Image: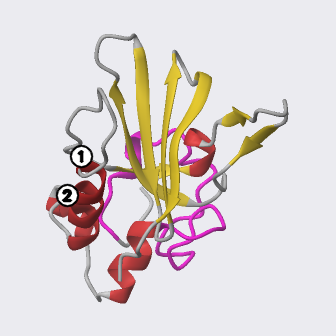
Amino acid sequence: MLETICGADCGECPFREACGGCVRTGGRPFGEACIVAECCKEKNQERCAACGGACALRKQLLEEMSALDIPDLPEITRLYSLRGAFVNLEYPLPDGRRIKLLEDDKVYLGTQVPKQGSGRFYGLVADEEHLLVCEYSGQGDSPEIVLYRRRKGLR
């Protein structure tokens, strides 16, 4: 099993074969920063993911997401460490181009919740600088950007 900075259980991660290990890479398991590892290192905390979401980083993001005025968005109660490649959808722009907003090798905090009464989902993802809320169906089909903005920062 890979040793982590935050205490996450990587045993079920579908990307564990590609992961360089959080401790071994200094919090950059796929080559880019992990938001949780950076927070733990900055605050000299160990195993902050094991707190069940009670660390200041997760609390701040949960509060920020709960304050969003988005119709049919249920309460967000838990955030997960997510590799960008897992959540980096390609969004259509009005001019027909398509764009990805995340970095595949960065680790974000986020979650997926059902959009009430629609059969679609909201995906919420954040790092130190940005917050993305999108809507999609199935396995990320027909994605739409609901909100993408600069955050005030975590620190």
Amino acid type indicated by mark 1: Arg
Residue closer to the observer: 146 or 77: 146
Assign the magenta stretch its main secondary structure.
Answer: loop
SS for dot 2: loop
Amino acid type indicated by mark 2: Gly
Residue 106 at x, y = what percent?
Answer: 59, 60
Residue ID for mark 2:
53
Instruction: Name the residue: 19% across, 69% down.
Output: 55
**29 falls in the magenta region:** yes
Residue 48 at x, y = what percent?
Answer: 24, 69
Badge 2: how crowded within 10 Å, few (<14), some, or many (20+)? some
The residues bearing labels 1 and 2 have C-alpha atoms spaced at a distance of 7 Å
Residue 4 in view here: no
Identify the coloring: secondary structure
Q: Which residues are magenta?
A: 6-34
Looking at the image, tell me whether mark 1 or mark 2 is earlier in sequence order. Answer: 2
Instruction: Name the residue: 28% across, 69% down.
Output: 57
95 with respect to 154 (left or right): right
Split into 4 quadrants, where in the image is the C terminus?
bottom left
Badge 1: how crowded within 10 Å, few (<14), some, or many (20+)? some
Residue ID for mark 1:
78
Residue 144 found in image quarter: top right
Residue 90 at x, y = what percent?
Answer: 70, 35
Tell me the number on the disc at residue 106.
none
Instruction: Name the residue: 64% across, 36% down.
Output: 89
Residue closer to the observer: 27 or 23: 27
SS for dot 1: loop
